Amino acid sequence: FLFGTLLWPQVLQRWRELEAAGEKPQPALFEAMDEVLDAQRGQLAIPRRYDGMIKEIWALQPRFEQRGGQRPYRLLEHPRFRAAYDFLLLRAESGEVPTELGEWWTRFQDVDDDKRAAMLVADSAPKPRRKRKRKKPGEAAGETPPA
């Protein structure tokens, strides 16, 4: 947790640089994580067994912003939720993310299921509709087209 907290500003800076260069957010974050950890290996003796934990805490940060549908429930069940949540609160205290986000997650953990459902943010993007295959005339009745 401590390594993740200390190295986060470098990850965040590199993540933003990669996004500005046209990289998609998730791959940019993972590339930034790898680059920062690799660069720090020459300066700090970070045991490799901590890499997974550090990366999980970092990777969960964007998921805290998704407060609609089943995502918050799945995030609550994640084994590293508590560490990632504590890290989110530190980010909120520093002004990196709105304090409202940390407060929302604090309330979401403490209320019952009915209140949780009421707290969910409606998805702003409509769900993509599936396009149906159009059937040619005559195929609808089960007829097969002549070969």
Image: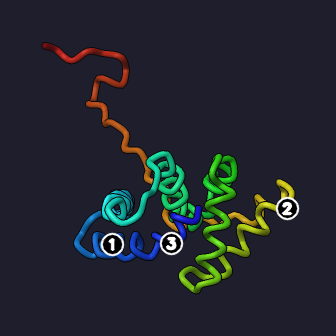
Find numbered disc 1 in the image and state the secondary structure of the residue it sits on. helix
Sequence-wise, the earlier of marks 2 and 3 is 3
Q: Which mark is residue 14?
A: 1
Mark with earlier residue (2, 1): 1
Residue 16 shown left or right of residue 92 in the figure? left
Picture quarter containing residue 115?
A: bottom right
Q: Which mark is residue 82?
A: none
Residue sitting at x 68%, y 47%: 77
Disc 2/disc 3 C-alpha distance (Å) = 32 Å
Residue shown at the point (62%, 65%) measured from the top left: 122
Q: How many marks?
A: 3
Q: How is the image coloured?
A: rainbow
The amino acid type of the residue labelled 1 equals Arg
Q: Nearer the viewer, residue 136 or 130?
A: 130
**143 to 16, vertically: above or below:** above
- Residue drawn at x 54%, y 82% is 96
**Up-down relation of residue 104 to residue 128 (above or below):** below
Percent from the top left, x then y, of residue 99?
A: 66, 82
In space, the residues marked 3 and 1 are separated at their CA atoms by 14 Å
- The spot of residue 112 in percent (x, y) is 86, 57
Disc 2 residue type (three-letter)? Val
- Could you say which is closer to the camera, residue 45 or residue 103? 45
For disc 2, the marked residue is 111
Q: Residue at x 68, y 74 (%)?
A: 102
User: Which picture quadrant has residue 82?
Assistant: bottom right
Q: Which is in the foreground here, disc 2 or disc 3? A: 3
Left or right of 130 in this view: 14: left
Number of the label disc, if any, that sits on residue 6: 3
- Where residue 135 appears, as percent x and y from the top left, is 30, 31
Circle 3: is it few (<14), some (14-19), or many (20+) Cα within 10 Å?
few
